[in-house]
Amino acid sequence: MKETARFFKAFSDETRLRILRLLLEGELCICDLMEVLGLPQSKVSRHMAYLKHSDLVNDRRVGVWIYYSLKEPQSKLHEYQMKCIRDCLEGYEVCKKDLQRLKSLQVKKSCA
């Protein structure tokens, strides 16, 4: 039950919800997340560590860059929560703007 509580705590922060919504679009570099969210590296990294500890994201290092992706759902609860994030956050203006910024970044290819 502790894992389930930790899982739900991961969804209790606006920034982490925004990050999860962005990661539904695919793997992202930490620098892309920083740019889209308008947050410093330390804050984004702290949220990513929390999501990783909650078993929601994978990470991989390529040189100095760290890339994050969503883990495959480990349970029905995990699967339903991720579907809810995709569907339920769709109408929020902040999420719409995040996705627009992400699309413009992907055109520019911001990471080296």
Image (cartoon, rainbow, N blue to C red):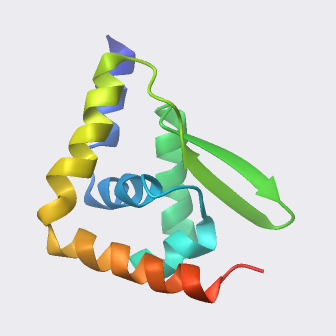
**Residue 19 to residue 78: above or below:** below
Eyeballing the image, is 93 above or below 84? below
Residue 64 location, x and y as percent?
82, 67
36 vs 27: above or below: below
- Asked whether residue 43 is in view, the answer is yes
Q: Residue furthest front?
A: 107
Residue 109 vs residue 14: left or right? right
Residue at the image position 45 percent from the left and 58 percent from the top: 25
Instruction: Please tell me which residue is depicted at 21% across the width and 41% down the height of the picture.
Output: 84
**Residue most toward the right?**
63
Could you say which is closer to the camera, residue 27 or residue 43?
A: 27
* Residue 19 picture quarter: bottom left
Q: Is residue 1 above or below residue 66?
A: above
Please name whichever residue, 35 or 109, is drawn nearer the observer in this view of the structure: 109
Q: Quadrant of the C terminus?
A: bottom right
* The N terminus lies in quadrant: top left
Q: Where is residue 110 shown, x and y percent of the image? A: 65, 84
Left or right of residue 54, residue 106 in this image: right
Residue sitting at x 50%, y 81%? 35
Q: Residue furthest top?
A: 1
Q: Is residue 38 visible?
A: no
Q: How many marks are shown on the rendered structure?
A: 0
The residue located at (32%, 18%) in the rendering is: 76
